[in-house]
Image (cartoon, grey):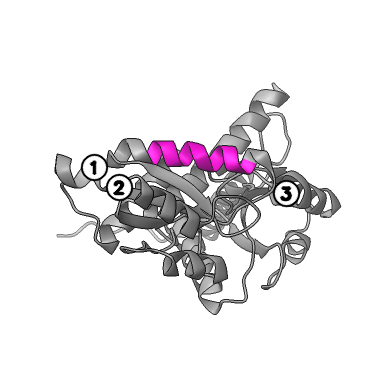
Amino acid sequence: MTASHPPRSESDIHLDSTAHLMNSISHELAGQLRLVSPLGHRRPARPALVLVAHGSRDPRALDTVRALRDRVRELRPGLPVHLGHIELNEPLLPDTLAALGDTLAVLVPLLLSRGYHVGQDLPEMAAAAPPPTRLAAPLGPHPLLVEALYDRLVEAGWPAGVDAGTRRSTAVVLAAAGSRDPDSTTDTRRTARLLADRLGVPVVPAYASAASPTVPAAVRALAARGRHRVAVASYFTAPGRFATQCAQAAPWWASAPLGAHPAMARLILHRYDESLATRSTEAA
């Protein structure tokens, strides 16, 4: 025989409804409180990461930086990652920053060394932007760039093992865009030394413009020293006119630009985190 339950009164039903309503309100309040600091201030939104590309008339460049942006997003889901260009491509950096409103933005230049853009253009653009901004260091020099350069050389045909005899006739030209800024050439020379340590052969920096030697001049100088097997390592973020010109001067073979290599995405996030850590230290 089953036990029978007395019918619930109207007051019991009313209490259950009230409890359910209070539980719903409490749950919603708890979600809102998670956005508020212990001192009662609303927690700030996560700073946006803005990739700053130079811009190029070569359509492959825009495809490349978009792919790099997407790889950064994959590595850190939830982080707002945007793209802005200094010139030639849309969106231009001022437009990207204007769309962010009052969100703090960390600008990470997709530039491989210091130079005029890092020292002049970007600080001026950041100062004129509506949102508060933080300018990160350029990508180079850094060991992660050497990792990407090495992999691109291997993809182009760099041998896994080089014997002593072959090593004596082998060298690499590190082909960069070039700048009149001495800091830029200093940074490129440092990357060349890091890559030479990795490869075990001489690596000579050379430039497409504004600095010397040019890539053909560097190739000739190496040949005069008995280095006839010369590869060109493309020290460019994306394809473009300079990268193409430098690759055509390679007597052996040339690697592809760094592009959306995984090490590039990790380095971008490192520069982003580094900038925020520096800001926190300064505030403390």
Q: Residue at x 30, y 41 (%)?
A: 201
Find the magenta span and give its range: 184-195
Residue 240, magenta (yes or no): no
Q: Nearer the viewer, mark 2 or mark 3?
A: 2
User: Is residue 273 depicted above or below 234 in this figure?
Assistant: above
Q: Residue at x 23, y 56 (%)?
A: 3
**Badge 2: few (under 14), some or many (20 or more) residues near its Cα, within 10 Å?**
few
User: Is residue 162 depicted above or below 262 in this figure?
Assistant: above
Query: Residue placed farthest to the top in the image?
Result: 284
Badge 1 marks a residue whose secondary structure is: helix
Q: Residue at x 57, y 43 (%)?
A: 272
Q: Nearer the viewer, mark 3 or mark 1?
A: 1
What residue would you read off at disc 3?
Answer: 116
Q: In this rendering, does residue 275 appear at all? A: yes
The number of discs equals 3
What residue type is disc 3 on?
A: Tyr
Q: Quadrant of residue 11?
A: bottom right
Which of the numbered marks, if any, corresponds to residue 168?
1
Depth check: give the residue in front, 120 or 80.
120
What residue would you read off at disc 2?
Answer: 226
Give the mark nearest the N terminus, 3 or 1: 3
User: On the rendered image, what quadrant is the C terminus found in?
Assistant: top right
Q: Are marks 1 and 2 in contact (CB under 8 Å)?
A: yes
**Badge 1: few (under 14), some or many (20 or more) residues near its Cα, within 10 Å?**
some
User: Is residue 156 depicted above or below 34 in this figure?
Assistant: below
